Amino acid sequence: MRAIVHHQFGEPTDVLDVEEVETPQPGPGQVRLRIVLSTIHNHDLWTIRGTYGYKPELPARAGTEAVGIVDALGEGVDGLQVGQRVATGGTFGVWAEYVVTPAAGLVPVADGLPDEMAAQLVSMPFSAISLLHSLDLQPGDWIVQNTANGAVGRMVAQIAQARGIHVIGLVRRQSAVDELAQQGIHNIVSTDADDWREKALAIADGARIVAGVDSVGGTASNDVLSLLSDNGTLVIFGSMGAGKLELSAGDIIFRQATVKGFWGNVVIKTMDAETRGALFGELSRYLADGTLTLPVAATFGLEDAREAMAASLSPRVGKVLLRP
């Protein structure tokens, strides 16, 4: 079969190639999937660079989220059938024609859900909804997030609105405010204006901002922190390659703020099955009624992997997908 492979860590546009590799066979408790579509995420790119929390041995495969068809069952697998369509958000090496993965981590896909949505179902949407769940927010609460025009940012805003939670979104350019407005996402402030902080606080109109989500790092982390009310929580969701946070000691001490990290890959593995099922059910309803949208920017074949990486690294609306 064909798979995307890299023999050294580096820029995805430089180090990825398509190679012929042995088709895997499922062991006990595993299934083999025939990949239909797979998604390119930022954490996939960081893994290829060798800068993510998981660093594979070289030569390494790539990709973690896909929708596929169950192609073969390993010993002891119950509840899945050959020919069934499923999604996975934590299987390493899905940028390929086939992959083997534990059966227990797969999510059955409803018949009416398009492949393009199913390929994005787990990682980003589930991270967004489980992030909101972890903050124990109530209807009427206010939160703030940066990278509001990113995939997770859009999903957090859409899910929060459905739950009655108010979100102030920060972006780096005014044009992104207009782009999000066209998608029905409002309360967005561009930090390229000198008075952006005053504008953000005016949106809340005196209400407590109980939590903030930072996906940028560097000085942007403190931008979010500076908007929090006393006893607020700053969640570090990502760092956009910054690597370090620049936070005001005064804001943390005098606001009695809590700073914590969030890694969806760990959350989904440690969450109890009842809660996980309820959250996936909620996501399915939002996708079915249009509350949550999962746009696709472009789709490439495996042989055009480097071009696909370049597209993913460029300004876009929606994810870039790979089709074997």
Image (cartoon, rainbow, N blue to C red):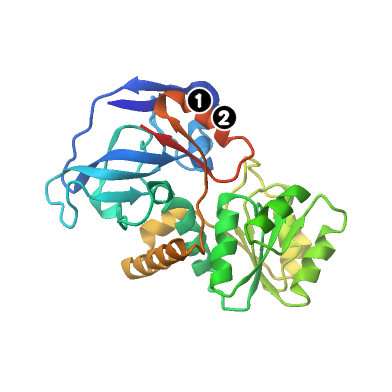
In this picture, residue 167 sits left or right of residue 272:
right
Q: Residue at x 30, y 56 (%)?
A: 111
Q: CA distance from mark 1 to mark 2?
A: 6 Å
Amino acid identity at mark 2: Ala
Asked if disc 1 and disc 2 are in contact, CB closer than 8 Å, the reply is yes
Q: Quadrant of the C terminus?
A: top left
Nearest the eye: 184 or 162: 184
Amino acid identity at mark 1: Arg
Residue 11 seen in render: yes
The residue beneath circle 1 is 306
List x then y, in percent, for residue 197. 81, 61
Secondary structure beneath dot 2 equals: helix
List x then y, in percent, for residue 227. 75, 65
In this picture, residue 298 sits left or right of residue 22:
right
Q: Residue at x 34, y 50 (%)?
A: 87
Residue 312: name its quadrant: top right
For the residue carrying disc 1, how many other residues have a C-alpha within 10 Å: few (<14), some (14-19), or many (20+)? many
Secondary structure beneath dot 1 equals: helix
Residue 9 seen in render: no
List x then y, in percent, for residue 138. 56, 78
**Which residue in the rendered view is the most extreme toward the left?**
75
Query: In this rendering, is residue 239 above or below 10?
Result: below
In this picture, residue 144 sits left or right of residue 75:
right
List x then y, in percent, for residue 207. 73, 77
Residue 244: name its quadrant: top right
The residue beneath circle 2 is 310
Q: Residue at x 43, y 58 (%)?
A: 267
